[in-house]
Amino acid sequence: MSLIMRLIFVSSILAVFFMSSACTIHRIDVQQGNVITKDMVDQLKSGMSKGQVLFVMGSPLIEDPFHAERWDYVFTMQPGDTRKITEYKRVSVLFKDQKVENIDVVNVN
């Protein structure tokens, strides 16, 4: 009888262990958009061509067909332990005659 009791005890301990480990939810960090660094933004200059901007920044996240002279680069970071965006960066490059006319930078340090 004691062998059966030990077996039931060990089985119940193992069952509780596996059930409790399955209840935890692991959420991964969600990083979306273009990686934007201060060094990249510092390289952008008025008068650069679209090809030069592509070389420095990469392909824009948003290339609006209604505003072909505007490229938007956006980066967001949402850690897995929260449901809030903790990091937001944006660079908008405005062109005129295929050359950079204006650069709008938000939260790039």
Image (cartoon, rainbow, N blue to C red):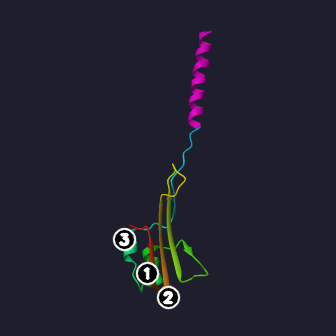
The mark total stands at 3
The residue mark sitting in front, 1 or 3, is 3
The residue positioned 55% from the left and 53% from the top of the image is: 83
Sequence order check: which comes first, mark 1 or mark 3?
3
- Rendered location of residue 76, percent (x, y): 50, 62
Disc assigned to residue 52: 1
Name the residue: 44% across, 79% down. 103
Secondary structure under tag 3 reads helix
68 drawn magenta = no
Asked whether residue 15 is drawn in magenta, I would say yes
User: What kind of secondary structure does the magenta stretch mostly adopt?
Assistant: helix
> Residue flagged by tag 2: what amino acid is it?
Lys
User: Is 7 drawn above or below residue 80 in the view shown?
Assistant: above
Q: Provide the residue designation for mark 3.
A: 39
Look at the image and give the residue range highlighted in magenta.
Answer: 1-22
State which tag comes first along the sequence, 2 or 3: 3
Residue 96, labelled with which disc? 2
Task: Give neighbour class at mark 1: few <14, some 14-19, many 20+ (Cα, 10 Å).
Answer: some
**Contact flag, marks 2 and 1 (Cβ < 8 Å):** no
- Counting from the top left corner in percent of width and height, residue 85 is at 51, 58
> What's the residue type where badge 3 is placed?
Asp
* Residue 37 in which image quadrant: bottom left
Question: What is the crowding at mark 3: few (fewer than 14 residues within 10 Å), some, or many (at least 20)?
Answer: few
CA gap between label 2 and label 3 equals 24 Å
Q: Is residue 63 left or right of residue 57?
A: right
Label 2 vs label 3, nearer the camera: 2
**Mark 1: which amino acid?**
Gln
Q: Dot 2: few (<14), some (14–19), or many (≥20) neighbours within 10 Å?
A: few
Q: Position of residue 58 (x, y in %)?
A: 47, 73
- The reply to whether callout 2 and callout 3 are in contact (CB within 8 Å) is no
Q: Disc 1 versus disc 3: distance between alpha carbons?
A: 15 Å
* Front label number (2 vs 1): 2
